[in-house]
């Protein structure tokens, strides 16, 4: 990413303009990862509606997602008639993990939970990001304490690419307003107290006053609540 583009992305107010500039970048592999949460649906809507075809949209199908997540995935495909690439965990890795530890061992220890995340999420993500130059995400600073220090554009030394977080400064109210105004399909679990939605066994609705990430891996210490995708 050249310095001119980086500076523009860091300072632009209209994230649609930022995505447009990225989509016009030649000779670069640009990818956007969606988990079909509200933020990701906002970005997918803009990419698909504006036909930013230079941006590859992909998702990670862990095999343990909620039925509602698969439903909004299907609705998104039908509404926009655009492609979303699916990356899945290696079958033998999942089989070996379950054979050794049982079907839900992540409740027993943090290490087993992280191993499950590594197999079902991190390994497929690494395949999706292979040779990518820019990775677009729907991360928002409001989502957790760990994300307060994020930058809109940052170099990821481990992955050797730039991460662009166009909605970093958006509030939940802004996201919901965009969804409603533009008739964007969204996960109906959001209407029932589910804020951050991941795999079904590892996600619950949150109570009033709880942290955004309280519903993810709720049986663990608060400081450990990341899966390895954004570390």
Image (tube, rainbow, N blue to C red):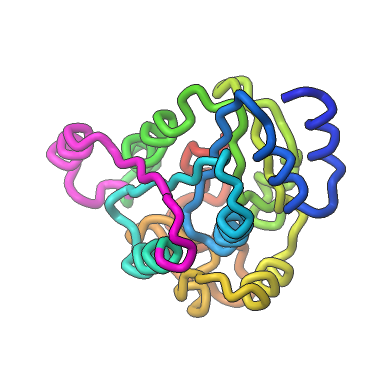
- Name the residue at 51% across, 73% down: 190
Q: Nearer the viewer, residue 142 or 102?
A: 142
* 159 left or right of 142 in image: left
From this view, report whether residue 214 is shown above or below residue 190: above
Q: Quadrant of the C terminus?
A: top right
Q: Nearer the viewer, residue 198 or 175?
A: 175
Residue 102 colored in magenta in the image? yes
Residue 101 colored in magenta in the image? yes
- Name the residue at 79% across, 31% down: 6
- Name the residue at 47% across, 54% down: 35
Instruction: Give the percent coordinates (x, y) of residue 71.
Output: 36, 68
**Segment tinted magenta in the rendering:** 78-106
Instruction: Give the percent coordinates (x, y) of residue 138.
Output: 61, 51
Q: Nearer the viewer, residue 160 or 14?
A: 14
Q: Nearer the viewer, residue 216 or 6?
A: 6
Q: Residue 22 occupies which quadrant of the picture?
A: top right
Q: Quadrant of the N terminus?
A: top right
Q: Most extreme residue toward the left, as rendered?
A: 99
* 153 left or right of 123 in image: right
Q: Residue 82 occupies which quadrant of the picture?
A: bottom left
Instruction: Give the percent coordinates (x, y) of residue 186.
Output: 51, 70
From this view, report whether residue 140 is shown above or below residue 113: below
């Amino acid at each position: 990413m050249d310095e001119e583009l980086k500076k523009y992305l860091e300072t632009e107010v209209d994230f649609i303009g930022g995505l447009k500039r990225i989509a016009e970048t030649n000779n670069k592999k640009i990818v956007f990862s969606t988990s079909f949460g509200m933020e990701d649906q906002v970005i997918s809507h803009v990419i698909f509606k504006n036909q930013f075809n230079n941006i590859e949209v992909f998702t990670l199908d862990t095999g343990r997602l909620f039925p509602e997540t698969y439903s909004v995935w299907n609705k998104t495909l039908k509404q926009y008639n655009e492609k979303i690439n699916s990356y899945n965990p290696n079958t033998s890795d999942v089989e070996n993990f379950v054979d050794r530890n049982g079907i839900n061992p992540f409740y027993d220890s943090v290490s087993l939970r992280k191993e499950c995340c590594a197999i079902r999420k991190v390994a497929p993500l690494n395949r999706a990001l292979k040779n990518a130059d820019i990775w677009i995400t729907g991360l928002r600073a409001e989502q957790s304490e760990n994300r307060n220090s994020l930058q809109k554009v940052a170099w990821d030394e481990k992955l050797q690419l730039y991460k662009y977080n166009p909605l970093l400064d958006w509030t939940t109210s802004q996201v919901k307003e965009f969804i409603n105004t533009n008739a964007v399909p969204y996960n109906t679990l959001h209407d029932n107290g589910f804020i951050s939605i991941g795999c079904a066994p590892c996600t619950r609705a949150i109570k009033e006053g709880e942290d955004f990430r309280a519903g993810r891996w709720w049986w663990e210490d608060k400081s450990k609540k990341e899966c390895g995708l954004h570390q």
